[in-house]
Image: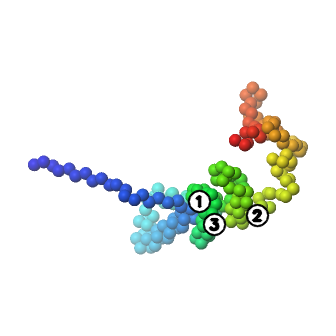
Amino acid sequence: MQALTVTRVMKILKVREAFLTDYEVLAHFKEIEERQKETAQVLGSAAALGSANFRTIQYELLDYLKSSPAANYTAEEIVQLSQDLAQFDLTKAERLQIINSRPKAAVDLYNIVEEMENRLSEEDMYAILGLFGVTAEENGEMENGEGDEESGEGYEHHDGQEGEYQEGEYQEEHQVRHGEDNEEAEVVGHSDDAMEE
């Protein structure tokens, strides 16, 4: 008699992937924690907790998410923010990051949105910040241009003296030196041209 070998191949018929906000992850893990508490009352605490590795990950994740902006959202706010952000030229991942990080300034959006200056107008940027309760005044925008590096005003040297930016000129005041003597020193600085890249 010959032995018959049967090989079973499992194939994923429909890929199910989705982006989740930190709020949704927090809600899911809170739900898991509640089920564990209910199971602990019935079966005992050891059976309810399951794997020690999973419990460690669960504890650290919950600890992180409870101290993040996700802890301050409601399910309705997440839905509303998702709908409001859909009107802007943003990818799903960018909308998700904006919701998760709850931006407080324009610089936060520049860190999230790739090529933001080409994709969003200044009005769009402030409209997005407005969704999180940030006004232009809170964002540091002043009508007279004070503090605007591009206007050449409001620049301060490390020694406390005021100065002006000059386009394309290397700013020695922004050099940071490391090492004991000049031969070993590494100079880190920026020019206006490098900042535009």
Residue 70 shows in this picture: no
Q: CA distance from mark 1 to mark 3?
A: 12 Å
User: What's under tag 2, amino acid-wise?
Assistant: Thr
Mark 1 secondary-structure assignment: helix
Work out whether 74 lies above or below 150: below
Q: Residue at x 89, y 44 (%)?
A: 162
Q: Earlier in the sequence, mark 2 or mark 1?
A: 1
Q: For this view, does 116 lie left or right of residue 62?
A: right
Residue 145 lies left or right of residue 28; in this view the side is right
Give the residue pinned by disc 1: 96
Tell me residue 11's x, y (percent): 34, 55
Residue identified by numbered label 2? 135
Residue under the point 50% across and 69% down:
31
Work out which residue is located at the far top of the displayed protein and give it.
183
Residue 59 higher or lower than 192, as above or below: below
Labels 1 & 3 near each other (Cβ < 8 A): no
Name the spot of residue 191 as percent of width and height, x first: 77, 38
**Amino acid type of disc 3?**
Asp
* Residue pointed to by mark 3: 84
Which amino acid type is marked by label 1? Leu
Decide if residue 96 is on the left or right side of residue 5.
right
